[in-house]
């Protein structure tokens, strides 16, 4: 089930390798337990995971939404690459 949520960085800005987040339900303002954060704009494994989920789900609406999101990510990354800018916010060796 999708819920509108926000993330709150739990680790210091300088600790990019071990960055963790707390996910907050915006309806209840409570932490959502058992979650993790993927940042597919900067992580090829996250993009692969989302593509696999879109392929495996039996929920066509979610599959379409994920594929559209991935298409937009790829478009923006290609645009940044064409402009000579990797555009990777975290700018460290853990990005692809």
Image (cartoon, rainbow, N blue to C red):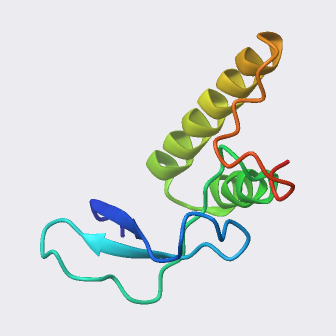
In the picture shown, does residue 76 fall above or below 12?
above
* Count of numbered marks: 0
Residue 13 position by quadrant:
bottom right
Q: Is residue 10 visible?
A: yes
Position of residue 20 measured from the top left corner of the image (x, y, whole percent): 55, 76
Q: Residue 51's x, y, as percent? A: 71, 51
Q: Residue 51 or 55: which is nearer the viewer? A: 51
Please state if 48 lies on the left or on the right of 55 as rendered: right
- Specify whether 37 is left or right of 54: left
Q: Quadrant of residue 1?
A: bottom left
Q: Is residue 40 above or below residue 28?
A: above
Q: Is the residue 81 above or below the residue 42 in the image?
A: above
57, 16: nearer the viewer: 16
Residue 93: horizontal and vertical position, in percent? 87, 55
Q: Position of residue 47 (x, y in %)?
A: 72, 51
**For the point 29% across and 83% down, which residue is it?**
31
Q: Residue furthest top?
A: 83
Single out the residue that lies furthest toward the left: 28
Camera sees residue 2: no
Q: Tell me which residue sits at (76%, 10%) in the image.
A: 83
| Residue displayed at 52% across by 76% down | 11
Residue at point 65% right, 30% down? 71
Position of residue 31 relative to residue 3, above or below, is below
Q: Residue furthest bottom?
A: 33
């Amino acid at each position: 089930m999708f819920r509108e949520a926000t993330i709150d960085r739990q680790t210091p800005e300088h600790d990019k390798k071990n960055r963790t987040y707390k996910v907050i339900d915006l309806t209840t303002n409570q932490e959502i337990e058992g979650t993790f954060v993927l940042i597919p704009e900067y992580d090829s494994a996250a993009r692969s995971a989302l593509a696999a989920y879109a392929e495996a789900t039996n929920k066509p609406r979610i599959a379409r939404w994920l594929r559209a999101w991935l298409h937009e990510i790829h478009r923006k990354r290609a645009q940044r690459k064409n402009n000579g800018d990797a555009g990777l916010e975290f700018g460290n060796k853990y990005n692809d």
